[in-house]
Amino acid sequence: MTHEYDEEEQFHAKDRKQFRKERKHRQETDRSKFKKTDQTHVKNVIDEKLPRGRVVAITGEGTWVEYEGKRFVCTLKGLLKKERMHAKNLVTVGDWIRFEKTSSSEGIISQIEDRFSFLTRTDISGKKEQLIAANVDQLFIVVSVVEPPLKPALVDRYLIAATKGNIHPIIAINKVDLLSNHAEEEERYQEFLAAYEPLGFPILTLSAAHGTGIEALRSLMKDKTSVVSGQSGVGKSSLLNVAFQLELRTGELAAKTFKGVHTTTTAELLPLPQGGYCVDTPGIRSFALWDLSKDEVFAHYKDIAKYASDCHYPDCRHVAEPHCAVLQALKEGYLPLLRYESYTTLLDEALGGDDNRTKRKQNDA
Ligand SMILES: Nc1nc2c(ncn2[C@@H]2O[C@H](COP(=O)(O)OP(=O)(O)OP(=O)(O)O)[C@@H](O)[C@H]2O)c(=O)[nH]1
Ligand SMILES: [Mg+2]
Ligand SMILES: [Zn+2]
């Protein structure tokens, strides 16, 4: 599983031997990953005398901190470890930190400021929380039509993650240029709009290829800090390139699967020419929420919850129970099928999640 994680988010094309060597060295020197032997608990007291920088990227070389227009490659101080047994990473792009300079281009991070917002998921091993970005105002949930196809449940996962992390979500649907000769996908796209527009989430219709919606994207990003996330190959980097005349690497899709090939390999905080910042992130293969409860699922699907008061059983989950008003609404066409399918997917995950949490607790005990 670790192997898969490495493949997904490290340098895919890199010579594996060299990669392992570098990783070993990193693991020996980098203190950002919690080890079982690190039991120190330190209260987050900020030393105002130390330089205050921002984490702009995390690469194989270390954590890159920007301070007074200069970049310092940093490691994490061992003492920084908190009681965060479940954390895959303690510091992430967007974090405000205090650090000690050890040379003109290197340093040691000694404190991480509390975050006002964060985007987090469960890492590929299923056991640890993985921070994707911190201190961002808004999340662009980038999906595409046709290739890769639109996935409502993925959008809902991100919407819940945004709520949990205090980030304003915006649904960004890219590649709409491909709809003109894909009737089935066009229908699904229209169903998606019909189901999600009434929920009040902002939706952007985009085409990096044709320039559709780019002006709206630019103005929404102005003077804000945004994170752009989604599956590999949906066109995150392409959109930023078109909107801000950047030269981020973009990739082809694997011919058979229409899946992206993880062109962007590290998250990076980019300053935007008209003001604001944006974190372009590597594409995700799956986005499992960290610590999802069934109450959070119920709270998110308000269009489903509104029928629930008419269900026969007060604890109805709206799956197979008799006299369920949600199932009735679905049958009568009041509730869109794609919303209901998304709901059952996430409900399953939440119930499985409860089991996972129990397992984790047992393991930790
Ligand atoms: N037809 C069409 N293709 C697009 C559009 N936007 C991006 N693409 C293509 O989709 C492919 C993937 O684009 P990227 O920008 O690399 O996608 P990404 O989301 O950054 O992918 P990762 O970095 O792997 O996460 C490239 O071949 C782009 O040319 C679009 O609006 N329409
Ligand atoms: Mg990219
Ligand atoms: Zn019900």
Image (tube, helix red, strand yellow):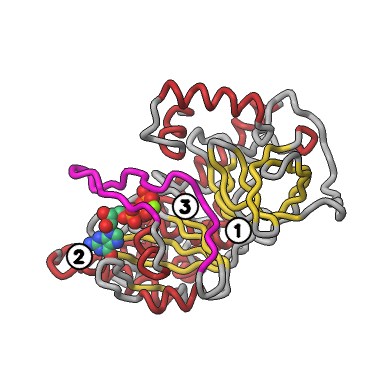
Residue carrying label 2: 178
Asked if one can make out residue 320 in the rendered structure from this viewpoint, the answer is no
**Nearer to us: label 1 or label 3:** 3
As displayed, is residue 353 above or below residue 172?
Answer: above
Q: Is residue 249 left or right of residue 181?
A: right
Mark closer to the chain start, 1 or 2: 1
Residue indicated by mark 3: 281
Residue pictured at 60% horizontal, 29% vertical? 26
In the picture of the structure, the residue carrying the numbered disc 1 is 164
Q: Amino acid at mark 2?
A: Leu
Mark 1 crowd level (few <14, some 14–19, many ≥20, 10 Å Cα): some
Q: Earlier in the sequence, mark 1 or mark 3?
A: 1
Residue 263 lies in the magenta-colored region: yes
Q: The N terminus appears in which quarter of the rendering?
A: top left
Q: Amino acid at mark 1?
A: Lys
Q: Is mark 3 within 8 Å of ligand 1?
A: yes
Q: Residues within 10 Å of mark 3 (few under 14, many from 20)?
A: many
Residue at screen point 34% across, 76% down: 213
Looking at numbered disc 3 in the image, what kind of residue is underneath it? Thr
What mark, if any, has residue 1 been given in the picture?
A: none
Give me the C-alpha separation between circle 1 and circle 2.
33 Å
Between 68 and 164, the one lying in front of the other is 68
- Horizontal and vertical percent position of residue 266: 48, 46
Q: Is residue 6 left or right of residue 40?
A: left
Front-lying residue, 330 or 231: 231
Give the extent of the magenta segment: 248-272
Disc 3, SS: loop
